[in-house]
Image (cartoon, grey):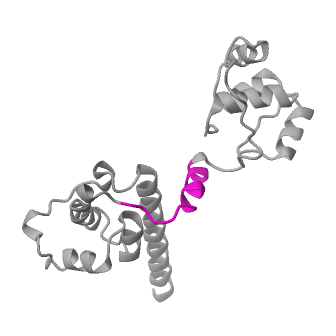
């Protein structure tokens, strides 16, 4: 089960502002029941400010009310935590790459082209923050520094996060599966 961001702060808010039982809060926040009871008694997390899961778009008021009516029901997140992180990240504008890291971009491009051959140039531009000319020169093996380019993971180089790379890989897998299913449909229609 996916846990909310800042689970203790979320538990503090749920204890203070709802009539949910300790088991419901503990399961939702990934905590032990005694820890939630300690929060209610003021022994645990006394300095933590509660975090409203409704304004953080992790829960709806209806979901809380539904679970307050029946203590056997469990709370469910609106969406995965990674989606929440990505939605926050999308609001940011362009990203600055330090001068020392700019020389690593061709290595990251080579790594992406090697491990994800079906990747589109626009996806690389968005992920790493490079130009299409650089991508094409590496793809065509005409880059001015080709002899020194070694494929290296863009996450390890600090050019993107693992979450961003994982979401791109997931998207590429979905596209690959759709193409495969379409090819099988076309074969079955022909044959």
In the depicted structure, whether residue 58 falls above or below residue 173? above
Spot occupied by residue 62 in the image (x, y as percentages of width and height): 87, 46
Q: How many marks?
A: 0
Q: Would you say 100 lies left or right of 53 here?
A: left
Q: Is residue 190 above or below residue 75?
A: below
Which image quadrant is residue 59 in?
top right
Highlighted magenta segment, given as a residue range: 82-96
Residue plotted at (68% across, 15% down): 44
Residue 4 in which image quadrant: top right
State left or right for residue 3 relative to residue 68.
left
As drawn, which residue projects farthest toward the bottom?
Answer: 190
Say whether residue 1 is visible: no
Q: Main secondary structure of the magenta part?
A: helix
Is 60 magenta? The answer is no
Out of 180 and 7, give the one closest to the viewer. Answer: 7
Q: Residue furthest right?
A: 69
Residue sitting at 85 percent across and 35 percent down?
Answer: 67
């Amino acid at each position: 089960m996916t846990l909310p961001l800042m689970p203790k702060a979320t538990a503090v808010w749920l204890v203070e502002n709802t009539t949910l039982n300790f088991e419901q809060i503990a399961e939702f926040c990934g905590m032990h029941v005694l820890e939630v009871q300690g929060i209610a008694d003021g022994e645990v997390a006394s300095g933590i400010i509660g975090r409203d899961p409704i304004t953080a778009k992790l829960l709806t008021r209806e979901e809380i009310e539904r679970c307050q009516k029946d203590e056997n029901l469990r709370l469910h997140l609106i969406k995965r935590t990674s989606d929440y992180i990505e939605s926050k990240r999308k609001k940011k504008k362009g990203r600055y790459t330090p001068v020392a890291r700019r020389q690593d971009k061709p290595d990251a491009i080579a790594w992406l082209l090697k491990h994800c051959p079906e990747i589109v140039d626009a996806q690389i531009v968005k992920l790493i923050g490079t130009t299409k000319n650089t991508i094409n020169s590496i793809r065509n093996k005409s880059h001015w520094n080709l002899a020194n380019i070694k494929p290296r993971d863009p996450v390890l180089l600090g050019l993107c996060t693992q979450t961003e790379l994982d979401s791109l890989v997931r998207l590429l897998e979905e596209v690959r599966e759709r193409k495969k299913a379409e090819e099988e449909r076309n074969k079955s229609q022909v044959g």
